[in-house]
Image (cartoon, rainbow, N blue to C red):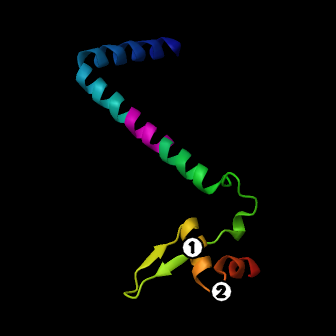
Amino acid sequence: MFHGLWQDLRYAVRALRASPGLVLVASLSLGLGVGANVTAYSWMEGLFYHPLPGVEEEERLVRVDWRWQNGEEQALSWPDCVDLRGATRVDPISALQAE
C-alpha cells in the first residue's frame, strides 16, 4: 500500500517540476483565495459576533438622521446632536433616552 503511495508522490513531484509556471499560478491563486476568505470571515465575525468596545447595552444604540427637504437623509454626528439640542426647545437626546 505505501509502495504505491510513494510512487504516486514521486510522479506528482516530477510532474510539478515539469511545469513550474502552473505551480506558481496555482499556489498564488490558492493563497489569494484562502487569504481573502479568511480576511472576510474575520471582518464579519468581528462586526457581528463581538460587542462594540465601550458599549454596555448594545441593543439601546440608536441612529439619528437628518432629513433634508428634498427627502435625502444624512446621519448626524454627536457634535451635531449636541448643537441641535442647544438650538431647539425639545432635547432630542433626552427624548431618545425616555423611549
Q: Quadrant of the C terminus?
A: bottom right
Q: Secondary structure at mark 2?
A: loop
Quarter of the image where one finds residue 69: bottom left
Q: In this image, 32 relative to 86: left or right?
A: left
Corner quadrant of residue 31: top left
Q: Position of residue 79 (x, y in %)?
A: 56, 66
Q: Residue at x 30, y 19 (%)?
A: 16
Answer few, some or many: residues within 10 Å of disc 1's Cα (few below 14, many 20 plus, some between 14 and 19). Answer: few
85 or 21: nearer the eye? 85
Q: Is residue 32 magenta?
A: yes
> Badge 2: few (under 14), some or many (20 or more) residues near its Cα, within 10 Å?
few
Cβ–Cβ under 8 Å for marks 2 and 1 = no
16 or 31, nearer to the observer: 31
- Residue 9 visible, this angle: yes
Q: Tell me if residue 63 can be seen.
A: no
Dot 1 amino acid type: Asp
Query: Which residue, given by chain and number where applicable, does mark 1 sit on?
Result: 83
Q: Residue at x 58, y 66 (%)?
A: 78
Res 97 label: none
Q: Earlier in the sequence, mark 2 or mark 1?
A: 1
Q: Please report the bounds of the magenta region as a residue range.
A: 31-38
Q: Which residue is mark 2?
A: 90
Please say whether residue 24 is one of the residues in the magenta stretch: no
Q: What kind of element bears circle 1?
A: helix
Residue 89: give x, y in percent of width and height.
64, 87
| x and y, in percent, of residue 34 in the image | 45, 38
